[in-house]
Amino acid sequence: EMKYKPKPRFVEGFFAPDGKGIRRTLVGRMFPQPIVMRPDGKLTLLDEVLGAGFALVAFGQTPERAVSEFVQPIWKKIGIRRIGIYSLPCALPRQAAQAGILDAAVVDHERAVAAAWQGYEGQVLALRPDRYVMGAFPASDPGRAALVIENLLHATWSDRVESASLGKPDDSDRAGQI
């Protein structure tokens, strides 16, 4: 008997819904972890490139343009890394990482990111440290993205402070929460 294990997805928690249907959204799902190519030509897992914290991820021929305006203070506050994933075929511009626009630039070597990114053209994805997609935001509106994340952090923090002041458990060990 064959058993099917669905991919985990969350509809509540530290997420900013993007308005897409539950079957079409990346928000609340784990972002793919394919093998990508670094500027030096070496292959590595995307997870190693993303690092240990929050990440803003842009994909396409010029991902550095998509994240270049995401400079609001909230991104620094949460230690965000800006990751550019270049689609194939491409000439990987090392200068984007050198100019400080991107913290890392890689190529979608297996085209797995391209497959996942369908329907998210022109968007920047915010990833949580556990690699779940926290939100998807138009690259053209970084101010709105920052505001949404600030509100999400405030709501999460306020709930924890309120619970602590009332002597209630804060559910910090609940699955799907950060």
Image (cartoon, rainbow, N blue to C red):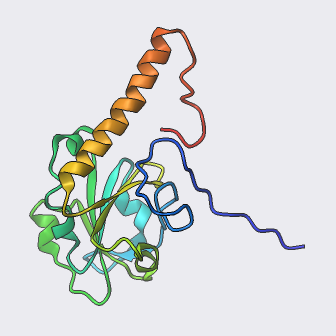
Furthest-bottom residue in view? 89
Between 108 and 150, the one nearer to me in the picture: 150
Residues 81 and 148: in front is 148
The answer to which image quadrant residue 101 occupies is: bottom left
**Residue 43 x, y percent position in the rendering:** 39, 76
x 21%, y 86%: residue = 91
Q: Position of residue 118 (x, y in %)?
A: 42, 77
Identify the residue shown where x is 68% and y is 63%. Answer: 6
The answer to which quarter of the image holds residue 18 is bottom left
In the displayed structure image, the side of residue 102 where residue 12 appears, left or right? right
Give the residue drawn at x 48%, y 14%: 164
71 in relation to 48, above or below? above
Q: Residue farthest to the top?
A: 166
Q: How many marks?
A: 0
Quadrant of the image for the N terminus? bottom right
Tell whether 153 sits left or right of 27: left
Relative to 73, is 51 on the left or the right? right
In the rendered view, tell whether residue 144 sits above or below residue 48. Answer: above
Q: Which sits in the foreground, 109 or 166?
A: 166
Question: In the rendering, at what x and y percent does residue 98 appear?
Answer: 12, 65
Q: Residue furthest right?
A: 1
Q: Position of residue 32 (x, y in %)?
A: 49, 67
Nearer to the camera, 80 or 65: 65
Is 74 above or below relative to 61? above
Image check: 3 left or right of 63?
A: right
